[in-house]
Amino acid sequence: MATVAEDEKEAFLAKLRSFEGQEYGPPERGADPVNQAMIRHWVEAIGDANPVYVDAEAAARSVHGGVIAPPVSLQAWVMRGFRPTAGGSAVQQELMGLLDGAGFTSVVATNCEQEYFQELHLGLHLSTTTTVESVSEEKQTGLGVGHFVTTLVRYTDPDGNLVGTMRFRILKFKPGTGRQAAKPAAERPPRPRPAITQDNAFFFDGAKEHKLLIQRCASCHTLRHPPRPVCPHCGSYEWDTVEASGQATVYSFVVNHYPQVPAFDYPLPVGLFELAEGTRLVADFVGVEPGDIAIGMPVQVEFVAYDDELTLPAFRPARK
């Protein structure tokens, strides 16, 4: 006899699967047709030197008869911008909202499969339709308990002919139900050791004494970090150090979530800090929530002793 919990799971799965076969919305047309500028950016980024992508004469002599885009760039021609104007279709919002409401609030893309039927010639303007193809039963994964949602994207030309398809699969899962949650708490491993050389040992020795030491060229007095054996400006091998004030601003930062290393706490904000003296260094943040960090924020160095052997500089918001 099925339990109440099993009956509830089956009823919830039936609701999820009622979305199968539904389209996310009307066809969407890409913002731009296939063009040479974007192709060049694409192939330079992935290191593909095939001349049929960038050389009009070579492409004209090929079986393609002209410049084409790499097949795997299919998705790029219809992707929404960094800040899309629309928040997704009603069907998509309803399906994701149903999963969120049941506690499956975390999401990760798992894989995609593309199939190609036409070449992507210059000037081709693509449109897409997206259909919910399948929703899996509840699965136990390393990240957590969740459901796989697979969508089928159809790419068509202006005449409605099929150019390609893409199956895109995500996992919506419950945070805290993964492999790590099942493991007993273990003693935290030590923070990874930096690679210390004769060029940078002064920096770590200074940190143990709560001094932020920056390498300086003895000839042209240019500061440089990370330390190195020769000045990139004048070529001198002679150098000394100066003690920085520790005052800085946030030049840039990232907030790491995955992959997680047991020696660190997450989310893990890491900053690129511009020192008052004019050089920059990478370090952790302390005493601030990731959501409160901003570019240009004034900060002050603070030295963190992770164990008896390792002390490193970190930065916290400057006191007003």
Image: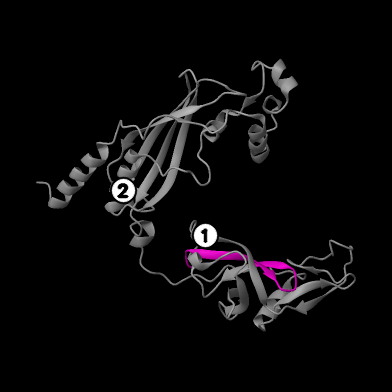
Residue name at image x 77 percent, y 71 percent: 198
Query: Residue 245: percent from the left, percent from the top?
Result: 70, 80
What residue is pinned by disc 2? 97
Residue name at image x 54 percent, y 33 percent: 31
Quarter occupied by the C terminus: bottom right
Disc nearest the viewer among 2 and 1: 2
Toward the viewer: 39 or 261?
39
Say which element carries label 2. Answer: helix
Residue 139 in view in this figure:
no
Q: Which residues are magenta?
A: 265-282
Query: Residue 110: percent from the left, percent from the top?
Result: 43, 43
Residue name at image x 61 percent, y 79 percent: 303
Identified by mark 1, the residue type is Asn
Q: How many angstroms separate mark 2 from mark 1 (CA)? A: 26 Å
What residue occupies the far left of the structure in this picture?
A: 1
| 43 displayed left or right of 80 | right
Toward the viewer: 111 or 274?
274
Query: Residue 84: percent from the left, percent from the top?
Result: 48, 44
- The vertical placement of 265 against 75, above or below, is below
